[in-house]
Amino acid sequence: MCLACTAVISAGGGAAEWTNTAGLAVNSYYSSNICRVPNDEEEKLVGTVTPNVNLRGEGARAFVALDAAVEYNTLGESSLECPQGGAGFGVANRETWVPRINFLSEFEAVENFLFLEADAFAAQNSVNPFVTGGDDNINGVGNTNITSRWGAGARIQRQYSERWAVLARYNYNEQYNSFNQVLGDSQEDRVELDVGMIPEASRFSLGVRGQYSEVTFDETLTQPEFVNRLSRLELRSALQLSRSWQLNAYGGEEDNVFLSSSDEVDGSYWDVGLRWAPNDRVTVNAGYGERFFGDAPRFDISYRHKRTQLTASYIRDLQFPRNIRAADGGEVASDPLNPDVGLPGDPLAGAGGPTFIGQTPVLNENFTLSYRFNARRTTFSVQANDSQQTRAENGSTGSFQNVTAIVTRQLGVSLSGDVRLGWRNNEGDINGTGGGLFGQNLEAWTVGLGVQQKLGPETILSLRYLYTDQTSDTDFNTFEENRVDLGLRFSF
C-alpha cells in the first residue's frame, strides 16, 4: 500500500479507512495488418501484460484516491518497420510502456480553513489525429504521445455563516509530453477566487468570482518559448425561485494575452441561465451568453433512475491544447482497465481528446453524451463526443467526432457476450486550404464481437474479434484490419 499516502491520512487524526483492489491482465493480439497499410499487409502477434491498482483512503482530515495501470507490449522494441511513419511526417515512435494514472489527494492543514491539494495524471494520446495510429499501442504505426502532469496547491475555504462563504485557490502544475520536440512541455500558475453568498442558502445571492491562468510553453522545433495569460473578474447572482428552480446570471471583464489572428481577444462578457433540480436524480443547467468570440451557449444534463444513467453537456469555450490532451486529469472515478465503454481484453485506454499540434488556444465547441441502460441480463451503453475546434492563431479548424455503442448479454451463469459498433470521423481545414494538419481527413468504422468466461470469482478469460475499416483522402491513411484477442484477467 502507498506508505506516503498512509502517513498523510494518519497525520489528520483518527483511523484511516482504506479500500483497494488490484489486477493483472495478460493478452495476445493477432493483427492481419499491423502496419495499417492499404496494400502488402503484414500479419503479426503482439503480447501485453497490464497490472493495475485502485486505491481509496479517507481519514478525518485527509483523502487520497489513485487509479493506475501500466501496459507493457512486445511491439515497442520489435524490429518491425512500417512504411508511412506514424504521424505522416516521420513519427514512427512506438511505446513499450504505456501508463494510465489518475491521482488526487487533499489534506486539511487548518480545520475548516486551509486545505493542501495534489494531483497527478499520465496517459497516452495521439500526436496527429488526422492520420493513422495513435488510438492504441497494438499497431506498428506509432503516432503516439504520453502526456504526464503533476500539480500542487492550496485552498482557503471558509463558511462564515449559513449564507456567506470564501474560496481562494492556488495551483501550480507542470505538463510533459514524450513527443515534446513538437508538442512541448509547459508550466501553469492558476488562481481562483469566489467571495459572496451561497446560492442554495439564500433566496437571492450575490458574489464576486475571478480566475487567473498563466501558462509558460517551452521552446520546441516549431515555436519559441512564449507565455499565454487568461484572466477574468465577474459579478455573479442567483435567484432561488423554488426548491427546484434557480435563475442565475453573471457578467464581467476578461483580460487575455495570446497569439491570435483577431484583434478581439478579451472584453466584457455576460451569461444568463436556469438550473432545474427537482430531486437528487435529475439536474439540468442551461444558459446563454456572449464573449469576445461570439455566442456562448451551454447546457449540462444529468439523469439517473434505477437502471438508467444519462449525462449530456455542451459548451463553447476557449481552451489550451494542453488541457484537451489531459482532459481526464483530475477525475478518479473507475478502474482504468474498464472504462465506461470498455470491455475485458481491450488494450489499455488512452485519455484526453484529439486536438491540433501546437499550443496556442483553440475555440472548442464541445458536445458529449453518455448513456447506459441495465436490464436483467443485458446492458446497453453509448458514448459520443463532437468537438469543433478553431485555432486562435490562424483560424484553422478541426472536427473530431466519435460514437461507441456496446451491448453485453449474460449468456449463462459464468458466460457473457458482447457486440460493439464504433464510428470516428476527423476532418481538418488549415486556414481554408482543406485537409488535415500534416495529413488528411479520415473516417473509421469498427465492429466487434466477444465472449467472456468466468473461470473463478476473480478470473476472466476473454476472446474477441474486431474489424476496422478506415477511409481517407489519401491511400496511406486507408486500411482494413482484422484483430483477434485472447486475454486472461486476474483480480486480487
Image: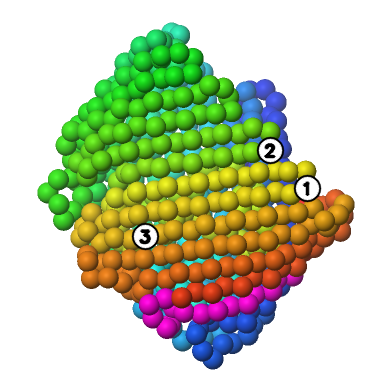
Q: Can you give x and y, in whole percent of width and height, for residue 83 in the image?
A: 46, 86
Q: Cα distance, mark 3 to mark 1?
A: 37 Å
Q: Nearer the viewer, residue 4 or 87?
A: 87
Residue drawn at the location 36% of the way across and 60% of the way down: 399
Residue extending farthest bottom: 40
Tell how many labels: 3
In the image, what residue type sits under mark 3? Ser
Question: Residue sitting at 44 percent across and 58 percent down?
Answer: 401
Q: Amino acid at mark 2?
A: Arg
For mark 2, give the secondary structure.
loop
The numbered mark at residue 120 is: none
| Residue numbers of the magenta segment | 472-486
Quarter location, residue 10: top right
Q: Amino acid at mark 1?
A: Arg
Of the two numbered discs 2 and 3 in the rendering, the one whose residue sits closer to the viewer: 2
Q: Which secondary structure is most common in the magenta stretch?
A: strand
